[in-house]
């Protein structure tokens, strides 16, 4: 049974990584464009990127039955949970560096979801994009370390 559960976990993690990579491809397509519509499109994809990462975190949390008690801080707590090594249960999913980058992306996602009457600042969106680009170079290593740590 454990072998099947591990295979399912890996398959679900790699499915989420594929979704994340798909969003990165959309960001690549849009990052060279300028102007209000391009900025809004980038912001929307950055929002989607964090949501895809959060889906990955939910897979890990659900697999290990790591319930988040405080639903009012669910998004922040779920992200913090991925930084933890839970002795005898699972390794951390995220390095400290990726946690910081993802926390910035989480904050942007929160702003974007609630910015009904605000004009997006292209310069600030580009700063978030720079963090997301740095994260792109690093996060798959965290995923691989996590999977190796769980299987060993």
Image: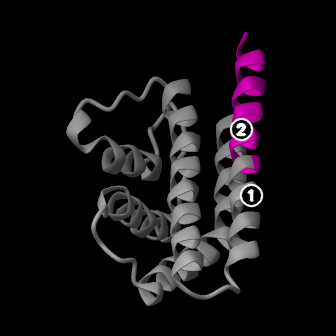
76 left or right of 35?
left
Side (left or right) of 68 relative to 148: left
Element type at mark 2: loop
CA gap between label 2 and label 1 equals 27 Å
Residue 123 on the magenta segment: no
Q: Residue at x 61, y 88 (%)?
A: 34
Q: Residues within 10 Å of mark 2 (few under 14, many from 20)?
A: few
Residue 139: where, in percent of width, then height? 64, 62
Tell me which residue sits at (51%, 31%) in the image: 89
Please name the colour scheme applied to the rendered image: one colour
* Looking at the image, residue 54 lies above or below residue 41: above
Name the residue rendered at 68%, 43% in the picture. 16
Between 2 and 129, which is closer to the camera in this rendering? 129
Residue 118 lies, with reference to residue 145, above or below; the image says below
- Residue 152: assigned label: 2
Mark 1 highlights which residue? Answer: 21
Nearest the camera: 1 or 140? 140
- Figure quadrant of residue 33: bottom right
In percent of width and height, residue 72 lies at 21, 39
- Start-end of magenta stretch: 1-18
In magenta segment, residue 11: yes
Where residue 41 sits, quadrant-wise, is bottom right
Dot placed on the residue nearer the N-terminal end, 2 or 1: 1
Kindly report which numbered mark, 2 or 1, lies closer to the viewer in this rendering.
1
Looking at the rendered image, the quarter that the N terminus falls into is: top right
**Is most of the magenta stretch helix, strand or loop?**
helix
Residue at x 74%, y 34% (from the top left corner): 10
């Amino acid at each position: 049974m454990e072998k099947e559960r591990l295979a399912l976990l890996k398959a679900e993690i790699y499915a989420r990584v594929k979704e994340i990579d798909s969003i990165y491809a959309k960001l690549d397509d849009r990052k060279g464009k300028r102007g209000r519509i391009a900025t809004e499109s980038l912001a929307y994809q950055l929002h989607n990127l964090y949501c895809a990462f959060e889906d990955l975190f939910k897979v890990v949390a659900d697999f290990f039955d790591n319930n988040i008690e405080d639903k009012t801080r669910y998004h922040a707590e779920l992200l913090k949970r991925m930084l933890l090594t839970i002795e005898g249960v699972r390794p951390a999913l995220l390095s400290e560096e990726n946690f910081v980058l993802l926390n910035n992306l989480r904050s942007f996602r929160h702003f974007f979801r609630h910015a009904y009457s605000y004009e997006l600042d292209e310069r600030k969106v580009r700063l978030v994009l720079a963090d997301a680009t740095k994260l792109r170079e690093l996060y798959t290593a965290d995923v691989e370390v996590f999977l190796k740590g769980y299987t060993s």
